Image (cartoon, rainbow, N blue to C red):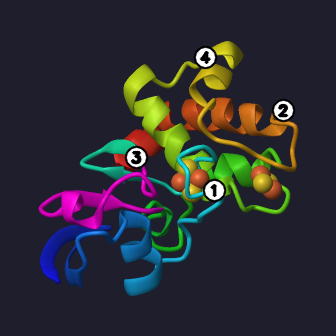
Amino acid sequence: MTKIAVTLNGRATSADVEPRTLLVQLLRDTLHLTGTHVGCDTSQCGACVVHVDGVAVKACTMLAVQADGTQVLTIEGLAGGTQLHPMQEAFREHHGLQCGFCTPGMIMTAVDMVARLGTDLSEGTIRENLDGNLCRCTGYHNIVKAVQAGAHAMGAPAAAAAE
Ligand code: FES
Ligand code: FES
């Protein structure tokens, strides 16, 4: 076992992991943050997306030891207390989910998309940048609408002031 330390959702966290432990296993099985989902385990579905040092990563493709010393943000750390993050609020408002299984990964990918590409995202850009996230339920239309609205909301003065 190897001891690793991460800043997880803003809190210093440490854990003993095996060399083969995946980041998603550390989050779900050891630290009980089950908002990060496992849909495929083969780097295809995007249900496991988290941010590592501010960049979206499929947590089933990264070893926990590789996260040692990093800042990890999961869906549980996105909201500010009881206040939903603007992207979460947009998914709620625009019915961007049905069963919700893909939703944490979609939202973490969407927030990363805004960080990389800005708050004014075209439908085409959103669809292109969501190509690593699969949804079995929605047909994507409302997800795209939600990402577009959430991106705009993230650029609004109130949201900017809160970050
Ligand atoms: Fe990681 Fe599907 S569980 S991409
Ligand atoms: Fe069910 Fe996307 S809402 S998988």
Q: Which residues are magenta?
A: 58-74
Q: Circle 2 sits on which residue?
A: 141
Question: Quick one: which residue is furthest to the front in this view?
Answer: 20
Which badge, 4 or 3, comes first in the chain's sequence?
3
Distance of mark 3 from mark 1, alpha carbons? 15 Å
Disc 1 crowd rating (10 Å Cα; few below 14, some 14-19, many 20+) is few
Which corner quadrant of the image does residue 161 belong to? top left
What residue appears at the point 48 percent right and 41 percent down from the top-left corner? 111
Give the number of the mark in front: 4 or 1: 1
Q: Residue at x 47, y 31 (%)?
A: 114
Q: Residue at x 34, y 54 (%)?
A: 62
Q: CA distance from mark 4 to mark 3?
A: 19 Å
Q: Which mark is residue 57?
A: 3
Q: CA distance from mark 2 to mark 3?
A: 24 Å
- Between 94 and 35, which is closer to the camera in this rendering? 35
Q: Where does the image place residue 96, in percent across and percent down from the top left? A: 78, 47
Magenta-span inclusion, residue 19? no
Bin the neighbour count of mark 4 within 10 Å (Cα to Cα): few under 14, some 14-19, many 20 and up. Answer: some
Tell me the crowding category of disc 2: few under 14, some 14 to 19, or many 20 or more residues within 10 angstroms, Cα based: few
| Horizontal relation, residue 83 to residue 95: left or right | left
**Circle nearer the N terminus (4, 1):** 1
The numbered mark at residue 125 is 4
Cβ–Cβ below 8 Å for labels 2 and 1?
no
